[in-house]
Amino acid sequence: MPFTNADYLPSYEELTVPELELTSAALRAGAHHFGKYCDSQCKEFMLCSKEERDPRKCLAEGKEVTRCGFEFFGKVKRNCYQEFTKYFQCIDHSDRQMSLRNCRKTQAVFDKCIKDKLDQDRPELGHFAAVRIHHTDRPKPQPKPHQLPERIVDPPDFSKLPPPKNPYPPTQI
Amino acid sequence: MASKGFKQEMPPPGGYGPIEWAKQVPQKKLSGYAQFGLFIGFTLGAWVVYHFQKNQRRREDLEMRDARLAVTPLVEAERARLFLKQLRENRDEENELMKNVEGWKTGTLWGEPAYYNVRDRFISPSTEEYFAHCKYWEKFYAVHDKLNH
């Protein structure tokens, strides 16, 4: 392992948080609204993980994403339980890719419930695939300076030296 | 030798018809203009339908991509935590395993670090290191789990 005892690895207590135990159909059904509800947290976490390239430094952001997921799906469960259940069951039996295109009727009912209860529209097509700008207070990470070895001595100025003697003079015949 | 009931076969009354010796060409059902017109018409219609369906398919693919991208942070956060938990477990396991070996330092080879890491970057361990304390089949199933879906 590349990690010695001196290296920082978070303890089990830091890593153990309640995880969102949802099946893939439910995640896909609520994906668009979840992404819009937790927009800031998701962007912060993804920016952190792409900038730092170190999962140890983005734990707090990741926990915030999971907490926001609990908050959103908890609200859905409290307010739109029937609509959401029908929608994700439809998606579960849609096809192999769990496509959304076969479930427009139940989707419309679910969207209307979200609009009434959570006051949130469905994001327009291509919202998450487009480039989005995120403003954060987290400073941009700077890696430690690289320690280069000492510079080797420069070669002498050859233009001021006399021309070298040819070690292989032309043979006299 | 004639026997009773024998009857000589004779040509039909009026004789046989004339022998058909000329080439038999089937009659054309459509003219050349009509055939070209049908071809061009069907091709243009298919072109229109193809583009309509292509745009529709692209919209549906984009929607599915949206759905996957939206839940990516949620999945990635949980995955990062599991990953770090396993790294911690591996280090604890190595400490426990090599506690009786004199001069062994965890994460190094007899005190020599495994990587030249001056800038203190995070080094993701290789698959063999990550699954070092597992059985071979556990690693195999974990790596090839995607083939089951």
Image: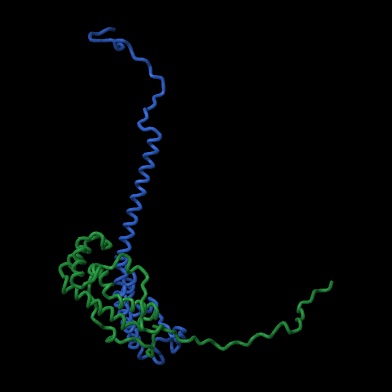
Chain colours: A green, B blue
Pick the front one: B135 or B144: B144
**Can you name the residue that lies furthest to the top here?**
B2
Q: Nearer the viewer, residue A60 or A116?
A: A116
Say if B26 sits above or below B70 in the image: above
- Residue B22 image position (x, y, % from top left): 41, 21
Question: Looking at the image, which is closer to me, B88 or A162?
Answer: A162
Residue A80 in which image quadrant: bottom left
From the viewer's perspective, is A21 left or right of B122?
left
Residue placed at 36% from the left, 79% from the top? Answer: A135
**Count of numbered labels shown in the rendering:** 0
Residue B23, position as x, y percentages in the image:
41, 23
Give the percent coordinates (x, y) of residue A93. 21, 61
Q: Is residue B89 above or below residue B20?
A: below
Rendered residue at 31%/57% (across/down) = B56
Name which quarter of the figure residue A56 lies in.
Answer: bottom left
Residue sitting at the far bottom: B102
B108 on left or right of B72:
right
Q: Quadrant of residue B117?
A: bottom left
Which of the image's four quarters has the N terminus of chain B?
top left
Question: Residue at image x 21%, y 66%?
Answer: A111
Q: Which one is nearer the viewer's eye here, A147 or B8?
A: A147
Percent across and percent down for residue B47 are 37, 49
In the displayed structure, B95 sits above or below A122; it is below
On-image quarter of the C terminus of chain B: bottom left
Q: Residue at x 58, y 87 (%)?
A: A151
